[in-house]
Image (spheres, rainbow, N blue to C red):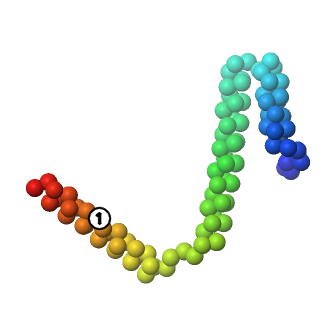
Amino acid sequence: MPLPNVSAKTFSFSAVIVGYLLIDDLTTNEQNALGNWLMLVAQVLCTNAFYKQVEAERRMYKTPNKEETIHMMEKMMNAMTEELETLKKRKN
C-alpha cells in the first residue's frame, strides 16, 4: 500500500480524524478491540522495520570471524576472572 505524499503533520492528523470519526460509531468494547488490533498491527510493522534495519547494518559491517570471536570471549573471561579475584580479596 503506497503512502500518501503529504506532510508528516497532515499524515498524523489524518489518524486523529479517523480515530474521532470511529468513536461515535463503536461501543466501548468495540473501540477497545479495534484499538488493540491497530496497536498490534503497528507493533508488527515496527518490529519488521527494525529487524530490516538490523539486517542492513549487519551487511554494512564486517562480522567477526571465529578466531576474533574466540579472542574477544577470552579477553572478556580474563577480565571477569580478574574482577572476581579483586572482589574475593576485598571480601577477606
- Name, please, the residue furthest toward the bottom: 67
Q: Residue at x 10, y 55 (%)?
A: 92
Q: Nearer the viewer, residue 67 or 13?
A: 13
Q: Residue at x 20, y 58 (%)?
A: 87
In percent of width and height, residue 27 lies at 73, 18
On the image, numbered disc 1 is attached to which residue? Answer: 80
In percent of width and height, residue 38 lies at 71, 36
Question: In this rendering, would 85 be left or right of 29?
Answer: left
- The part of the image, by quadrant, that contains residue 59 is bottom right
Q: Residue at x 16, y 56 (%)?
A: 90
Q: How many marks?
A: 1
Question: Dot 1: what SS?
Answer: helix
- Name, please, the residue furthest toward the right: 5
- The part of the image, by quadrant, that contains residue 56 is bottom right
What amino acid is labelled 1 in the image? Met
Question: In this rendering, would 7 be left or right of 67?
Answer: right
In percent of width and height, residue 13 lies at 81, 34
Q: Nearer the viewer, residue 58 or 44?
A: 58
